[in-house]
Image (spheres, rainbow, N blue to C red):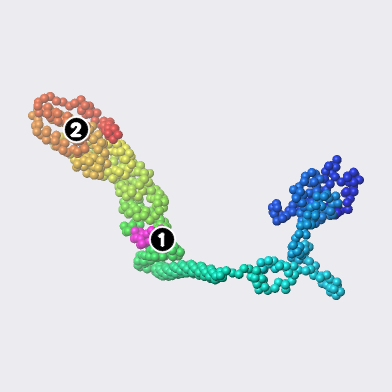
Amino acid sequence: AWEKYTSGFASKMMKKMGFKGRLGKEEQGVSRHLEVKVRPGQIGLGYGGFKEATKIKANQKLERELGHKSADAADGADDGEDDEEDEDSDGRLDDSSDDDELRSRRRRRKRHKAKSSIEKQVESSQGWKKSGGKGKKEVRFVVGDEAETQEPPQKQVIIDMRGPHAKLVSTMDDLGTDADVIDESVSRQQPPKLGEELLHNVNLCVDVLAADLATARQKERAADSTRVSSQRELQDIQQQRKRVQEHKAKIQLTKSGLGKMKAGASELRRGASDDSRIVRDICRLARTMHQGCPDEYAAFRMDFLVASFIEPFIARRVGSIDFFDAAASASLLDICDVWEPLHGLRAAEYLDAILAEALVPLLRSALTNSWTPDSAIEARQLARVLKTVKIVLREDQFEALLDSAVVPKLKMAVDSSRSNSGDELHAWILPWVKILKSKLQDVFPAVRQKLATAFRKLHVDEDASASTLEAARSLIAPWYGVFDPRAMVGFVDRIVMPRLARVVFKVEIDPSNQDLSVLQGVLSWVVANESKAEGVEDGGFLAPEQLLAVLETEFLPRWLQVLHDWLKQDGVALKEVAQWYMGWKGFLPRFVTDDPKVTSMFAEGLGMMRSATKGEPFSLSDRMLEHIQRSGKRACELALERRRHERIMRDE
């Protein structure tokens, strides 16, 4: 079949080579190729009456040759169009068709003859079909004699389906009127029953009214929905208008307040005398605007504006402060109190930063260039000023100021102070304790060294007068609670205790004329809040256990020795001895008489007094004799160490 498009050169060459019409050595193959029919894209099997390739006559013939009879071939061939397509594919009808094919053709012809005349005319008329040609149909004009010989136009077929039965007409004029069709259809109907038309009309009216009612209800719902949405839109518009009006009023209020602030700032720049009042007015205006118009306050960045308005006032006030004047601290507090209405706002933070920026350089310059560290008056004044400044400055700024301007200068002043001026150290160092705190730990070693030198120069152990003892107490007592507890105990043990032991040892015990001034001076060294002793004034520096160790080793053994010797005398007045004994117990503080060691010594003296009253022999105990023999610095140190150990054991 494909050779109808060629010259047949290939088949000729194959015949010369022995090809007889079928493939295969024994000619058992097919005599022609399979016909192919392209399926349109994305179309399913059997959809739209599409003719598959298996239904093509040439392919069915090949199946029969190979012994595979198809179902389509058994049922018969398709309509006339299939024959036409097969003829197009084969080029001609195969002369070797068998009887089955002839019978199938006859059946198709019979079916074609059995069709109605209308169907035949419709099939024969191709006017309604789309032209099979490609592109536009060529328009050809006929004129002259050619028009006479032209064949008449093809007859048009029209099917009238307006009535109960379809009618076939050839022209539009044959259609007739709608009345004819209606009359013809009505004439063929049976006469209506009685009342049927009335019922039909009533039902029709009901349906029309129901439809009208439904339409009216729908329109009413639509109107209600429109009214509700309109009301909502109106409310939104009214609220929006109200917000716009409020916003406009707030903007006007903000502008008015801002104008007043600018006027006040202008007066501050000119140096008005009542600048504090002006600043307070500006701060109150800012607070009012923040409370009433917070959004506008933030939008206008009023915090920055307020701080910029008050900045000239701060610079002028800080520049006029004399930090060595007693009123300097009050002046700083007055400056900070001016913007008290801004507390909690960011403007207050900005003003504090501006104050710190103006204050720190001036204060550092005063501390570095004008401050005399060993002046007690300046120390107290600057300490008050720095205590106020601490409220304004950030912690890091304040610490940096102390580290750079105060601590180094104090340490240098302690190192360069005269050795005999140790009694004045506390006057100009102690005011800084609450400000500097732990920063003074670097200064205290030099202070303790100066105190030790000054205490030695008092020669307390040589001149144990009441005035000397009071001077010693005044020298060391102010530092109690200032030094680290361990450092204070070590200082007292190393510097004070040896001299105190010698002072107590030199106290003369004379029943006939007893001088108690030295012991009273020594007792004043004891810390009252630790001893809880009656009659002991506050302001000491000795721990109770330190004084008890001294009395245990340097005084009470000698006191018992004097009592023993007095009782051994002939004709001793026991009543006087008893009064002397009770006088000592009443003189010593409660913490001394309640001590177990001291109590045992008083008990031993009382035993000797009872033995003397009864006339029985008595003597000092061996333990007491050993105490008397071991008196001195080493004995006092051992007694103190033992007492501390006992206290630690009790605490545990």
Q: Is 288 on the left or on the right of 175, as rendered?
A: left
Q: Residue 67: x and y, percent?
A: 79, 44
As drawn, the label of residue 635 is none
**Residue 436 x, y percent position in the rendering:** 36, 48
In the image, 588 versus 9, the foreground residue is 9
Residue at the right extreme, as displayed: 16
Cα distance between the residues tagged 2 and 1: 70 Å
Amino acid type shown at disc 1 = Ala
Residue 345 in magenta stretch: yes
The dominant secondary structure in magenta is: helix
Q: In which quarter of the image is residue 158?
A: bottom right
Q: Residue 143, position in %: x, y? A: 84, 74
Residue 622: image x %, image y %?
Answer: 20, 25
Q: Please rate how many residues cluster around mark 2, counting C-alpha atoms within 10 Å: few if below 14, some from 14 to 19, many from 20.
A: some
Identity of the residue drawn at 17% across and 32% down: 602
Point 19% across, 38% down: residue: 590
**Disc 1 marks which residue?**
347
24 to 75, vertically: above or below: above
- The reply to whether residue 247 is visible in this rendering is no
Indicate left or right for 540 with 392 as reference: left
Q: How crowded is mark 1: few (under 14 residues within 10 Å), some or many (20 or more)?
A: many
> Which residue shows up at 66% across the image and 71% down it?
184
Residue identified by numbered label 2: 599
Q: Is mark 1 on a helix, strand or loop?
A: helix
User: Magenta residues?
Assistant: 332-351
Q: Seen from this angle, which residue lies furthest bottom?
A: 144
For residue 106, say whether it is visible.
Answer: yes
Hey, what amino acid is under mark 2? Thr
Residue found 85% across the figure and 40% down from its top: 26
Q: For residue 105, what is the image quadrant?
A: bottom right
Q: Which of 340 and 154 is in front in this view?
A: 154
